[in-house]
Image (cartoon, rainbow, N blue to C red):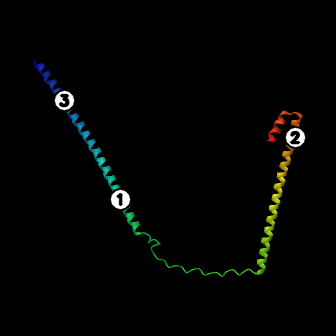
Amino acid sequence: ALQAAKLKAEREAKAAKAKADKEEAKRVQDKAKADRAAAAKARLEARAAKEEAEKAARLEARKASLAKRASEKPPPSASKVPRPTPPPPPREEAPPEKSEAMKRKEAEQARADAKLREEAEKLRMREAKAAQAKEAARREAEARKNAAAAARGDKVARMKAEREAK
């Protein structure tokens, strides 16, 4: 009985020790988890603080840039500032009048140019008439040929001649 009690006490002591070890392990685990969470939170806060600082720095730089630009503004536009008007350029002397000989020569040249243009126009008209006459003669020869073929009884030629007659 004593031995059974001793065994029972050992078992209970082992169970209590195991339970204590388990609780200690859980506490260590919870502490590690809490430490990790705190570290993550600290990192997030650090990143947020860094971004806030950068944003503030950019804003300050922009303000400084705008202030600098405002101080370097160009003078008001010319339309608002009266400017002295420059003196008018000195007038050049008018070209000398053309002599009578020059005037006659230019008139003669203009007449010669007009005559040449007129002759060129007449030549073009003659060429156009010749081309029309040539085309008419070609058509007439074609019609005679078709008529002769039709008289011989060529059916295709007769149909062509009828078409030409229309």
In the rendered structure, which amino acid carries the disc numbered 3?
A: Lys
Q: The disc labelled 1 sits on which kind of residue?
A: Leu
Occupied quadrant, residue 112: bottom right
The residue beneath circle 1 is 59
Q: For the N terminus, which image quadrant?
A: top left
In the image: residue 46, left or right of residue 16: right
* Residue at which label 2 appears: 145
Residue underneath mark 3: 19
Mark number for residue 72? none
Mark 3 falls on what kind of element?
helix
What residue lies at 81% left-to-right and 66% top-to-bottom? 116
Q: How would you rate the neighbour count of disc 3 (Cα within 10 Å): few for under 14, some for 14-19, many for 20 or more? A: few
In front: 129, or 105? Answer: 129
Give the side of residue 76 with respect to residue 51, left or right. right
Along the viewing direction, whichever of 163 and 50 lies nearer the viewer: 163
Amino acid, disc 2: Lys
Identified at 83% across, 56% down, the residue is 127
Is 43 rendered above or below residue 14? below
Q: Could you say where residue 99 lies in the image, as x and y percent from the top left?
A: 75, 81
Residue drawn 38% across and 66% down? 67
Give the image quarter of residue 35. top left
Find residue 98 and report its horizontal and vertical position in percent. 73, 80
Characterize the local packing of mark 1: few (<14), some (14-19) or many (20 or more) Cα atoms within 10 angstroms: few
4 shown above or below 166: above
Asked if residue 103 lies left or right of residue 83, the reply is right
Gap between marks 1 and 2 measured at Cα: 99 Å
Front residue of this view, candidates 162 and 104: 162
